Image (tube, rainbow, N blue to C red):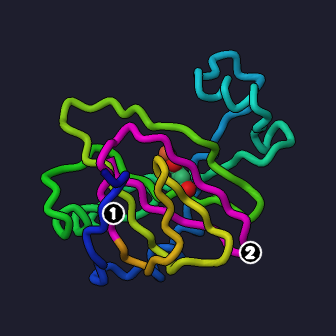
Amino acid sequence: MTAFNFVGNCSTVDWDTLIKDLENHVPRFRPPTNSNKNISKIEKLWNEVGYKGKLDGGTAEWQMYDAGKCFDESVVDTIIEFAEVPHYTYAWISKIMPGYCAPPHFDVMQSDKEIHRMHVYPVDAQMGHVFYVGDQYITDYKKGDVYVWTDSLAWHAGMNCGLTPKYTLNIY
Ligand SMILES: O=C(O)CCC(=O)C(=O)O
Ligand SMILES: [Fe+2]
């Protein structure tokens, strides 16, 4: 069984404009600093093995641009229609700057509906942009490529050891 399946390339979204326009919005920054006492089990694991958030002088940082706030939700509607998925609950574009990562984790999302976990690449594959789900990696992809995950709770991580910002559209 594979961790995710390729649905196809969705070229009806203006990906270049979407990414460029994110610069006019303020993202949420993750993870919070370690001095926050309510750290999760996963953040404890990160600390144990040596990851540190950027605010604590480390290399873990990813930014989240939420659909409906930082970009138009119609983009997500286009994707789920393209993938023949009935609904979504959450969607954001993650951005990881060169030298930073989203350490291994799984996302537990609160929803009364079934979660259809997907990810979409808004930019063609670039040198040093790493993303894995379970034991599966994709290195050769085009902007607009849509993937549906087999297990919405799969472990995954992203790392940017390249020279340009790394973007992913995450849908739940
Ligand atoms: O952008 C990435 O590589 C990972 C982002 C991610 O896992 C998340 O936002 O939950
Ligand atoms: Fe995630």
Q: Is residue 148 left or right of residue 158?
A: left
Query: Disc 2 marks which amino acid?
Result: Leu
Q: Is residue 11 above or below residue 28?
A: below
The residue sitting at 59% across, 41% down in the picture is 104
Between 45 and 24, the residue placed more toward the observer is 45
Q: Is residue 159 above or below residue 24?
A: above
Mark with earlier residue (1, 2): 1
x, y percentage for residue 97? Answer: 70, 62
Q: Secondary structure at mark 1?
A: strand
Q: Is residue 4 above or below residue 82?
A: above
Q: Is residue 133 magenta?
A: no
The residue sitting at 38% across, 56% down in the picture is 67
Query: Disc 1 marks which amino acid?
Result: Tyr
Between 19 and 40, the residue placed more toward the observer is 40
**Which residues, given as a range, are shown in magenta?**
146-172
x, y percentage for residue 42? Answer: 59, 28
Between 53 and 74, the residue placed more toward the observer is 53
Location of residue 45 by image quarter: top right
Q: Which residue is mark 1?
A: 147
x, y percentage for residue 81? Answer: 16, 65
Location of residue 154 by image quarter: top left
User: Can residue 65 be seen here?
Assistant: yes
Q: Is residue 104 above or below residue 141?
A: above
Q: Nearer the viewer, mark 1 or mark 2?
A: 1
The residue sitting at 49% across, 77% down in the picture is 140
Name the disc covering residue 163, or none. 2
Between 157 and 69, the residue placed more toward the observer is 157
Number of marks in the rendered image: 2
Q: Is residue 168 magenta?
A: yes
Location of residue 152 by image quarter: top left
- In this view, which residue lies farthest toward the top? 37
The Cα atoms of the two marked residues, 1 and 2, are separated by: 24 Å
